[in-house]
Image (cartoon, rainbow, N blue to C red):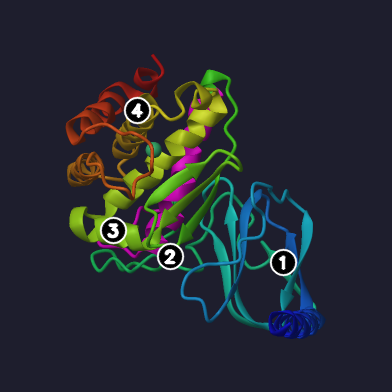
């Protein structure tokens, strides 16, 4: 009997807590405002971030795998607050940002009104860390965004190389008559994962904690190498290789090879140098161990992974699809 009464007390408590949670949620929803984003630029937008200023990394990506075409308008509901807004163009040209926007009522951000809509983008609104050897602000901006210099923040590495890897594979897909869909990439703070590709929603997650560790250990390009490896899995999915390799060591070897192919191209375009390539090989060797953070599937020895990377580095992507 005593047990029965205790159960009733718990049930009552549960009901009260649920009611409180529901009313709290209603209160939060009542404070939501609408952010309308209009793409007035002449380029497609692939990512839009509505990121609370209190977050020290970009959060709140809204588009997922969708794009905003020229003149497209999208609306998003967010709680009232102060935000940083960012839009990334699909062609990898400098992103546009506005900071510290107090959004207490419905708000419209017109992308392209504050950035050039010609083919000559100005310097990014959110510039890469200043390179002390070239402080020439009056120079016309290059059409190709400059790669980050060494010892760059993770955010700048990701925001430069993610679109660059994407563009590389878009070009490759076009040459092969394949279709490449940009994976959704999340840079998380999880300590229990390194990086992985999730085929269920064509997404990549890369841990900032892990990235900071390898960046310190091997250098900036090791972080890009890991992203390029996961992107290789996305390519496997797009090109129809993923299922044929799943859960086998060969899938990893092919992704390592595709990482080498991107690395070769990045070096050929002058984005990286021999020390960066070595950082790529070093991290490949490092993840060859049976460490749990890479992923739970089988992967080769350090030597085998470097060999796979080298196959793509010397032979390009074709060498990976033989
Ligand atoms: Zn992998």
User: Label 4 CB, ligand 1: below 8 Å?
Assistant: no
Within 10 angstroms of label 2, few (less than 14), some, or many (20 or more) residues? some
The residue mark sitting in front, 2 or 3, is 2
Q: Position of residue 166 (x, y in %)?
A: 50, 41
Q: In 3D space, how far apart are the residues under numbered discs 2 and 3 (Cα atoms)?
A: 24 Å
Q: In 3D space, how far apart are the residues under numbered discs 4 and 1 (Cα atoms)?
A: 47 Å
Residue segment shown in magenta: 146-174
Where is the N terminus found, in terms of image quarters?
Answer: bottom right
Query: Which residue is tagged 3?
Result: 149
Query: Which residue is tagged 1?
Result: 110
Query: Which residue corresponds to the image point at 55% horizontal and 80% vertical from the top-left?
Result: 53
Circle 1 — which element?
A: strand
**From where the camera sits, is residue 209 visible?**
yes
Q: Quadrant of residue 132?
A: bottom left
Question: Which sits earlier in the primary sequence, circle 4 or circle 1?
Answer: 1
The residue mark sitting in front, 1 or 2, is 2
Ligand 1's quadrant: top left
Question: Which sits earlier in the primary sequence, circle 4 or circle 2?
Answer: 2
Asked whether, in this view, residue 74 is left or right of residue 308, the answer is: right
Q: What numbered label is drawn on residue 249?
A: 4
Is 292 located above or below residue 190 in the figure?
above
Q: What numbered label is drawn on residue 189?
A: 2
């Amino acid at each position: 009997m005593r047990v029965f009464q205790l159960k009733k007390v718990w049930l009552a408590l549960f009901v009260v807590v649920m009611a409180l949670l529901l009313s709290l949620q209603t209160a939060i929803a009542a404070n939501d405002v609408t952010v309308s984003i209009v793409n007035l630029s002449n380029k497609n937008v692939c990512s839009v971030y509505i990121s609370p200023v209190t977050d020290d990394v970009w959060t709140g990506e809204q588009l997922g795998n969708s794009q905003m075409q020229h003149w497209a308008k999208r609306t998003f509901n967010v709680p009232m607050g102060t935000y940083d807004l960012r839009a990334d163009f699909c062609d990898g040209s400098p992103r546009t940002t506005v900071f510290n926007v107090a959004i207490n009522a419905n708000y419209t951000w017109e992308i392209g009104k504050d950035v050039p809509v010609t083919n000559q983008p100005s310097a990014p609104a959110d510039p890469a860390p200043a390179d002390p050897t070239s402080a020439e602000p009056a120079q016309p901006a290059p059409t190709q965004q400059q790669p980050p210099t060494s010892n760059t923040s993770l955010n700048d590495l990701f925001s430069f190389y993610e679109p660059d890897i994407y563009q590389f594979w878009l070009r490759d897909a076009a040459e092969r008559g394949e279709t490449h869909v940009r994976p959704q990439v999340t840079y998380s703070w999880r300590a229990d994962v390194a990086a992985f590709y999730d085929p269920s929603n064509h997404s990549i997650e890369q841990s900032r904690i892990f990235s900071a560790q390898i960046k310190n250990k091997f250098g900036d390009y090791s972080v890009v190498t890991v992203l390029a490896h996961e992107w290789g899995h996305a390519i496997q999915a797009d090109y129809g290789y993923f299922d044929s390799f799943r859960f086998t060591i060969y899938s990893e070897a092919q992704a390592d090879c595709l990482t080498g192919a991107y690395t070769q191209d990045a070096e050929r375009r002058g984005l990286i140098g021999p020390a960066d390539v070595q950082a790529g090989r070093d991290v490949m060797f490092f993840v060859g161990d049976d460490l749990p953070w890479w992923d739970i599937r089988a992967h080769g020895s350090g030597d085998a992974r470097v060999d796979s990377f080298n196959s793509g580095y010397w032979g390009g992507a074709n060498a990976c699809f033989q």
